[in-house]
Amino acid sequence: MGKIVAVFNQKGGVGKTTTVVNMAACLGAKGKKTLLIDVDPQGNATSGVGIDKSEVEYSTYDMLINSVSARAILTETPFKNLDILPADMNLAGAEIELAGLENRNRILKKAIATLVMEYDFIIIDCPPSLGLLSINALVAADTLVVPLQCEYYALEGLSQLVNTVRAVKKEYNPHLELEGVLFTMYDSRLKLTQQVVDEVNKYFPNKTYKAMIPRSVKVAEAPSFGKPVIYYEKYSKASFAYKKFTDEFLKKQ
């Protein structure tokens, strides 16, 4: 069975979608059959792997709300061993519609059950908020990767995130575990950066990745070309960092 990993932080702007796209692409490049699931209404993971959202016939919205099968929306990406369940703008209204449905927290888990056997890894891009879409992702997931920006406000949100995961574990998914914390937008020149790293290492001993994702112009440019950075500029610092992170992730499996 494929391992399901939710990439989640309720704080926006931490490099969550960038991490999803590049983690999934790196896994695929390493020969792992990988499925990316986009349940973020912004749909940036979808466009980040070269899929035009305006041309998507069925999306994760249709899967969650209209009972369209996951297989019907499954889309190949141009990248090695990487498929996607794409998102489109309709997903923006899904939170309200999900609220009226029975078993509303487990709809995603049920919807992807038939695909789990076909992939080595399933990576879910969550919205930057704790709504029903994120809860569905956390209920469906085996583990959780938390991208964390190296700044003070990221530390403030960490205890809230821990409480969220604890509540989901208690109520809906007792098997959910923290896979690890990935530092993003890392700048070794800043004293605050090291302070944040030290503090998080204290908070999560043995749960932080040694690989750290640097601030990078190439990472910012890659989505506009519909490519993960490892395909857009494979010799950039960010590409090497995401490959190193993926190696580290795989070693723990």
Image: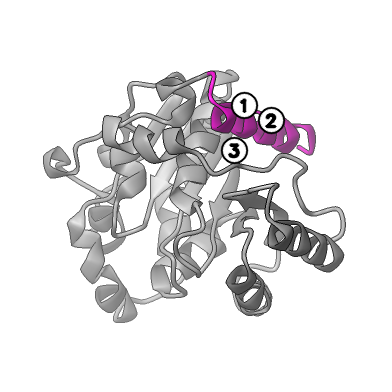
User: Where residue 217 appears, x then y in whole percent?
Assistant: 44, 37
- Would you say residue 130 is visible in this rendering? yes
For the residue labelled by badge 2, is the local secondary structure a helix, a strand or a loop? helix
Q: Which residues are magenta?
A: 235-253
Mark 1 vs mark 2, CA separation in Å:
6 Å
Name the residue carrying label 3.
2
Amino acid type of the residue that numbered disc 2 sits on in the rendered structure:
Lys
48 vs 24, left or right, is: left
Amino acid type of the residue that numbered disc 3 sits on in the rendered structure:
Gly
User: Where residue 224 appears, x then y in whole percent?
Assistant: 28, 36
Q: Is 2 inside the magenta-drawn segment?
A: no
Near-viewer residue (44 or 113):
44
Crowding at dot 1, Cα within 10 Å, few <14 / some 14-19 / many 20+, comes out as: some
Mark 1 vs mark 3, CA separation in Å:
25 Å
Q: Marks 3 and 2: CB-CB under 8 Å?
A: no
Amino acid type of the residue that numbered disc 1 sits on in the rendered structure:
Phe
Near-viewer residue (152 or 162):
152
What label does residue 244 carry, if any? 2
Q: Marks 1 and 3: CB-CB under 8 Å?
A: no
Mark 1 / mark 3, whichever is N-terminal:
3
Q: Marks 1 and 2: CB-CB under 8 Å?
A: yes
69 vs 36, left or right, is: left
Is 118 rendered above or below residue 207? above
Crowding at dot 2, Cα within 10 Å, few <14 / some 14-19 / many 20+, comes out as: some
Name the residue carrying label 1.
240
| Rendered-image quadrant of the N terminus | top right
Near-viewer residue (155 or 147):
155
Q: Is 247 inside the magenta-drawn segment?
A: yes
* Residue at the image point whose x is 45% and y is 71% from the top: 105
